[in-house]
């Protein structure tokens, strides 16, 4: 029956003798969506109807057999008992070491049990495991709680509790097991409530930060772009920044053109990106690329808001995964993960969770010594840096570092990258780290939308020299606006990147922004991407790149409508009014005023394409 609904081309790789599980259904639907979008609706409805009909016609009910343990538990328990005894009777282990050994033993069982229970019960035709396999309800770890055992659970602080949960719900838990496992369950329930609020708050801030990235022109005319791998699936819909593999600059990349470029032997290329768009305000359609509409976005399309919702929505689902785990421990190394890691990237708190120390100046690692409190002291030149105990060093004596390079395998704060390497490198760092965090947390790969967000999130500089721009000293301004009014120094010359070490960019190049100090690493990226002439000066650009945490973005905007929807409303409104910069422009890039007046909103046909903004 399935075969009569789904054409053969979309059934490639399916084994006709195996049940069709969630993964297979997803694969089929993806294939239909890519190859046969017009029939997607009909085919997906037909599969749904087939499932509903089958569920109605074939009866299925749970029996006591389904609650029996699928593995020989007596044998397993005897083995575990023996291991426990050998740990307890080992005279060389202190009490703490014994506890750690037990936690290790239970942790291993805890992480292996769900898969083992699932495999064994599925082979026996257990109906609970059928439900998990079909994707209808439950997951392997819940199945294991019911008919296997949890072994190790976490307390409210995510620390393992050294009371093994040897029984399952079907057998019934002993009192100690019950009280032990209740910690994790309670913390799971509480974290769902908090996570929903936290991720909701983060989504709102994303929307405020990105809401002025509307399409203000069709083409900003830039030849800049970000370097990407040709095989990266997220390239579909972007435009080539340079002529590549026989295709002219400006070609919209499709699966077919990408394949041709790859077949031509090209591995890396430059594509247009919101990160490198040079529109005076907002973004241009070509740097935004083909998005959810299937075409280049029309003028006034709010690409920023669409991208922030696309990122915010899975974020709240990712945060909710805490509930599904319900405090059962895995044996992975404990690193900051999930929503906490993503939120830290966006908010860049001063005490960064699992943050890596970075070199504060260029130089060679001259000495590494053990620190009395644990961890290491690393000397870059004569400057002492502290590397915490929990992190591993990734440098050694003699390593040559540039300011902003990490010393350990911890997480590098975007604020450090922006401070030491500039706005452009900061945007790329945020893009790469956020993208990796999404993938690590099982969220959809979302490079294109994160590019929009990286552009919005890393976009502030503090003015130090008023002669180069229209702004006052100490003013924190939007970097893109600053760059547009920037006056290069008189000694600016055109040079090859490798000859410009230590000098400062006066004109943006690739994703590097004005003011970036050219270092051997910067020059290498430029050369690799065919940038052989850059505009540099020996003098710094007259502003310091600054990473503004997402929470403060709204109050840094000058549009009163934006400020009303931000945090710290009273103080930010007062500051903007006192500085004389307050405006409430219904033709600006902020969607707030047109929304408040209910004019020009969504009325695309009446809008003059030459006018910027709504
Ligand atoms: Zn552009």
Image (cartoon, helix red, strand yellow):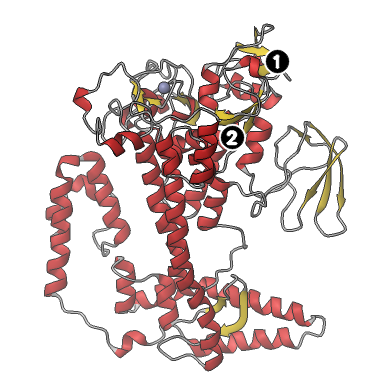
**In the rendered image, which residue does mark 1 sit on?**
500
Residue drawn where x is 73% and y is 32% of the image: 402
Image location (x, y in percent) of residue 395: 76, 43
Q: Which sits in the foreground, 492 or 122? A: 492
In the depicted structure, whether residue 389 falls above or below residue 178: above
Ligand 1: quadrant of the figure:
top left
Image location (x, y in percent) of residue 328: 51, 73
Residue 125, visible in the rendered structure:
no
Residue 575, visible in the rendered structure:
yes
Secondary structure of the residue carrying tag 2 is helix
Image location (x, y in percent) of residue 429: 57, 37
Label 1 environment density (alpha carbons within 10 Å; few <14, some 14–19, many ≥20):
many
Q: Which sits in the foreground, 263 or 84? A: 84
Quadrant location of residue 517?
top right
Q: Which sits in the foreground, 571 or 294? A: 571
Image location (x, y in percent) of residue 90: 77, 84
**In the rendered image, which residue does mark 2 sit on?**
426
In the depicted structure, whether residue 178 falls above or below residue 543: below
Label 2 environment density (alpha carbons within 10 Å; few <14, some 14–19, many ≥20):
many
Secondary structure of the residue carrying tag 1 is loop
């Amino acid at each position: 029956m399935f075969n009569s609904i789904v054409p053969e081309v979309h059934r490639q790789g399916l084994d006709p003798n195996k049940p069709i599980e969630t993964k297979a259904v997803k694969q089929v639907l993806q294939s239909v969506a890519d190859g046969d979008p017009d029939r997607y609706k009909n085919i997906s409805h037909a599969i749904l109807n087939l499932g509903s009909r089958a569920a109605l016609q074939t009866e299925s009910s749970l029996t006591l057999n389904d609650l029996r343990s699928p593995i020989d538990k007596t044998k397993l328990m005897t083995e575990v008992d023996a291991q426990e005894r050998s740990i307890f009777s080992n005279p060389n282990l202190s009490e703490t070491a014994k506890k750690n050994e037990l936690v290790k033993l239970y942790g291993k069982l805890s992480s292996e049990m769900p898969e083992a229970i699932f495999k064994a019960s599925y082979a026996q035709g257990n109906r609970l495991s059928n439900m998990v396999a079909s994707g209808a309800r439950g997951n392997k770890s819940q199945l294991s709680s019911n008919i296997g055992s949890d072994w190790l659970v976490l307390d409210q602080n995510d620390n393992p509790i050294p009371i093994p949960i040897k029984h399952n719900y079907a057998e019934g838990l002993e009192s100690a097991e019950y009280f032990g496992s209740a910690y994790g369950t309670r913390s799971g329930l509480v974290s769902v409530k908090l996570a929903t609020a936290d991720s909701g708050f983060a989504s709102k801030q994303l929307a405020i930060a990105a809401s002025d990235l509307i399409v203000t022109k069709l083409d900003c005319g830039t030849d800049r772009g970000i370097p990407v791998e040709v095989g990266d699936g997220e390239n579909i819909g972007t435009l080539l920044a340079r002529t590549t593999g026989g295709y002219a600059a400006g070609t919209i990349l499709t699966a077919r053109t990408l394949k041709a470029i790859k077949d031509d032997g090209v591995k890396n290329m430059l594509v247009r990106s919101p990160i490198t768009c040079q529109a005076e305000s907002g973004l241009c359609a070509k740097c935004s690329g083909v998005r959810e509409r299937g075409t280049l976005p029309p003028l006034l399309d709010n690409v920023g808001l669409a991208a922030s919702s696309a990122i915010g929505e899975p974020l709240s689902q990712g945060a909710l995964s805490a509930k599904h785990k319900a405090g059962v421990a895995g044996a992975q190394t404990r690193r900051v993960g999930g929503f906490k890691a993503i939120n830290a990237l966006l908010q860049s708190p001063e005490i960064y969770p699992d943050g890596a120390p970075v070199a504060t100046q260029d130089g060679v690692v001259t000495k590494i010594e053990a620190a009395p409190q644990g961890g290491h002291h690393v000397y870059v030149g004569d400057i002492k840096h502290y590397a915490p105990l929990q992190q591993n060093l990734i440098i050694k004596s003699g390593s040559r570092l540039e300011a902003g390079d990490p010393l350990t395998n911890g997480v590098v704060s975007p604020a450090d990258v922006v401070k030491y390497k500039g706005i452009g490198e900061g945007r790329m760092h945020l893009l790469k780290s956020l993208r990796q965090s999404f993938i690590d947390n099982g969220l959809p790969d979302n490079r294109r939308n994160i590019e929009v967000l990286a552009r919005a999130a890393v976009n502030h500089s503090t003015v130090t020299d008023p002669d180069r721009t229209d702004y006052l000293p100490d003013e924190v301004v939007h970097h893109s606006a600053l760059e547009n009014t920037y006056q290069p120094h008189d000694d600016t010359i055109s040079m090859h990147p490798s000859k410009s070490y230590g000098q400062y960019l006066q004109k943006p190049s690739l994703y590097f922004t004005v003011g970036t100090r050219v270092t051997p690493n910067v020059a290498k990226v430029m050369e690799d991407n065919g940038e052989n002439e850059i505009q540099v000066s020996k003098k710094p650009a007259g502003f310091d790149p600054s990473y503004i945490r997402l929470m403060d973005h709204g109050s840094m905007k000058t549009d009163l409508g934006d400020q009303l929807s931000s945090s710290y409303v009273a103080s930010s409104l007062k500051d903007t009014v006192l500085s004389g910069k307050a405006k409430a422009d219904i033709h600006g890039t902020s969607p707030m005023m047109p929304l408040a007046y209910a004019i020009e909103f969504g009325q695309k046909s009446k809008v003059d394409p030459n006018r910027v903004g709504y």
